[in-house]
């Protein structure tokens, strides 16, 4: 039996395909960026056709670079940006509109109108009212694309998150499915029953027939057709859940934080949906062999996106390396605080109308201070969600607070950021040398299902190496920075609302 696993990792700014061998090594990989569309302020869109074409190109290039054919693959794993939605015509396969991306805020006003329903929505879905999630995005598409609602009601349209769109294309329209981890991010799924909620479908006015069938995270639920070869699709998993599994941070008391476009903390809690007292999400981590594991999650909308914004829009550095060097060139921060609320504030604040801000600037402020403030702002928002998770964990019977944080994502390559994170958390940061943790998690889930690996214990025995960062900041300095951060957050909150 072949031991090669192809993983499609479809992210917010790029698509990639990677091939893993039985030792968990990446044999080949290929990545393609795609265009970001910003038709109005706070609107973010992707072209679903471009997403599929980049994924198709990447998988073919990864196979060619590894000198493998589709017949050499044991299975395919898919991991994806979550909450982003696509609606397409079932017959033609053509999207009716660009995909609406998870960062998009166009439905914030509608979500405000549901405040009377917020408690039962959160109890059912584990999610707070926010435009971040998929339900209001699907509703917007049905309401604003001419003829869409009628087509949806007569069964002519299909809707789904990016995993669903990719499976549809890989199977040539034969399968319309999503997994439990992605379904739990839509605000349409009862996470205890692991099925679409009729009451939520009625609230958002979404016809049941346009939604995909919900399947386990790990399991052969479809077969891709690549060059006329049928290959089992053995895992579908949201990117943050995949990264958590890639770290093997799968038991209560473990946690990981991904530093990508945004920051996403995830802490598995066991087989019962947790209830956060501190503004975190309750979500499905994965479903394997009939057992569902739940998790607490803290979502920060902007992390790497702030770095990209500073380079492209503010032009304070020409690339990430220069921004890092600039930030490291000053010992102090000049009392400058950056609040990365460029798309509102996520956990634990959940303010759709917060906006980004630099605070504390004087005539002595330099580009270097601004650069350092950006990294510090990313780290400070992670402190908030870690504190919330630790507090929730202390009230839970299923897990203990953690003292080590596993990290991944492109932004965590910054030693400066990781040291700031260790200092401000006063905790050890563990950064694996393996950088593709999201893809690795999807590979692990597919490989466990298809016999490439027999158990999690076998996965733990695979070779690995990592770098650790330990705190060395004086407590008084830490307290001062976090106090300034809290003051800054209070000033950035509800900015757009008050401006109107």
Image (cartoon, rainbow, N blue to C red):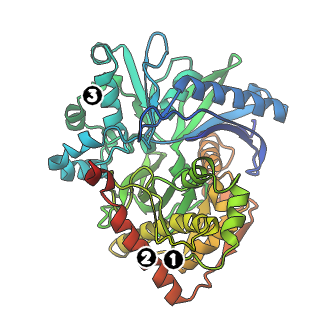
- The quarter holding residue 495 reads bottom left
Q: How crowded is mark 2: few (under 14 residues within 10 Å), some or many (20 or more)?
A: some
Q: Is residue 216 left or right of residue 113?
A: right
Percent x, y of residue 457:
64, 60
Spatial CA span between label 2 and label 3: 44 Å
Q: Mark 1 points at which residue?
A: 335
Q: Residue furthest top?
A: 91
Residue at the image point whose x is 45% and y is 57% from the top: 300
Residue at the front extreme, as displayed: 363
Comparing labels 2 and 1, the label whose residue is closer to the camera: 1
Which circle's residue, 3 or 1, is located before the other in the chain?
3
Q: Mark 3 points at which residue?
A: 206
Query: Which tag, 2 or 3, sits closer to the chain's start?
Result: 3
List x then y, in percent, for residue 323.
Answer: 67, 60
Residue placed under numbered mark 2 in the picture: 484
Q: Can residue 8 be seen in this view?
A: no
On screen, residue 208 above or below 477: above
Residue 447, image x and y in percent? 64, 44
Marks 2,1: beta carbons within 8 A:
yes
Dot 2: element: helix
> Is residue 294 among what the camera can see?
yes
Q: How many dots with numbers?
A: 3
Measuring from the top left, give residue 50's x and y in whole percent: 59, 25
């Amino acid at each position: 039996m072949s031991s090669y696993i192809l993983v499609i990792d479809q992210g917010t700014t790029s698509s990639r395909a990677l091939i893993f061998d039985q030792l968990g090594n990446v044999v080949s990989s290929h990545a393609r960026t795609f265009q970001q569309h910003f038709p109005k302020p706070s609107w973010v869109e992707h072209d679903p056709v471009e997403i599929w074409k980049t994924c198709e190109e990447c998988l073919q290039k990864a196979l060619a670079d590894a000198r493998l054919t589709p017949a050499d693959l044991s299975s395919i794993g898919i991991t994806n940006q979550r909450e982003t939605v696509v609606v397409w015509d079932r017959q033609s396969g053509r999207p009716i509109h660009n995909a609406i991306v998870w960062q998009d805020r166009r439905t914030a006003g509608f979500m405000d109108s549901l405040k009377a329903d917020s408690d039962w929505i959160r109890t059912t879905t584990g999610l707070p009212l926010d435009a971040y999630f998929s339900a209001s995005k699907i509703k917007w598409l049905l309401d604003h694309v001419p003829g869409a609602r009628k087509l949806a009601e007569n069964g002519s349209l299909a809707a789904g998150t990016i995993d669903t769109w990719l499976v549809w294309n890989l199977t040539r329209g034969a399968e319309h499915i999503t997994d439990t981890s992605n379904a739990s991010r839509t605000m349409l799924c009862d996470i205890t029953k692991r099925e679409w909620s009729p009451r939520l479908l009625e609230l958002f006015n979404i016809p049941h027939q346009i939604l995909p069938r919900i399947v386990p995270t790990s399991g052969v639920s479809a077969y891709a057709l690549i060059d006329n070869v049928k290959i089992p699709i053995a895992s579908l998993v949201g990117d943050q859940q995949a990264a958590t599994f890639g770290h093997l941070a799968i038991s209560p008391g473990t946690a990981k934080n991904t530093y990508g476009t945004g920051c996403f903390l995830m802490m598995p809690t066991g087989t019962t949906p947790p209830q956060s007292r501190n503004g975190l999400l309750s979500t499905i981590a994965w479903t394997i062999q009939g057992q569902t594991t739940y998790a607490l999650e803290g979502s920060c909308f902007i992390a790497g996106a702030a770095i990209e914004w500073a380079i492209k829009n503010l032009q304070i550095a020409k690339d990430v390396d220069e921004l890092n060097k600039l930030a490291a060139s000053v010992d102090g921060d000049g009392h400058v605080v950056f609040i990365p609320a460029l798309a509102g504030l996520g956990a634990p604040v959940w303010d759709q109308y917060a906006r980004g801000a630099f605070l504390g600037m004087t005539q002595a402020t330099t580009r270097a201070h601004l650069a350092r403030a950006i990294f510090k702002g990313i780290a400070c928002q992670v402190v908030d969600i870690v504190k919330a998770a630790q507090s929730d964990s202390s009230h839970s019977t299923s897990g203990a607070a953690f003292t080590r944080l596993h990290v991944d994502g492109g932004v965590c390559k910054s030693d400066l950021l990781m040291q700031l994170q260790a200092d401000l958390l006063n905790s050890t940061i563990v950064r694996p040398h393996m950088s593709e943790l999201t893809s690795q998690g999807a590979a692990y889930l597919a490989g466990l299902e298809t016999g490439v690996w027999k158990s999690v214990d076998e996965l733990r025995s695979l070779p690995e190496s990592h770098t650790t960062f330990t705190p060395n900041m004086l407590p008084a300095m830490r307290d001062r920075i976090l106090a300034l951060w809290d003051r800054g957050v209070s000033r950035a909150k509800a900015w757009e609302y008050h401006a109107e």
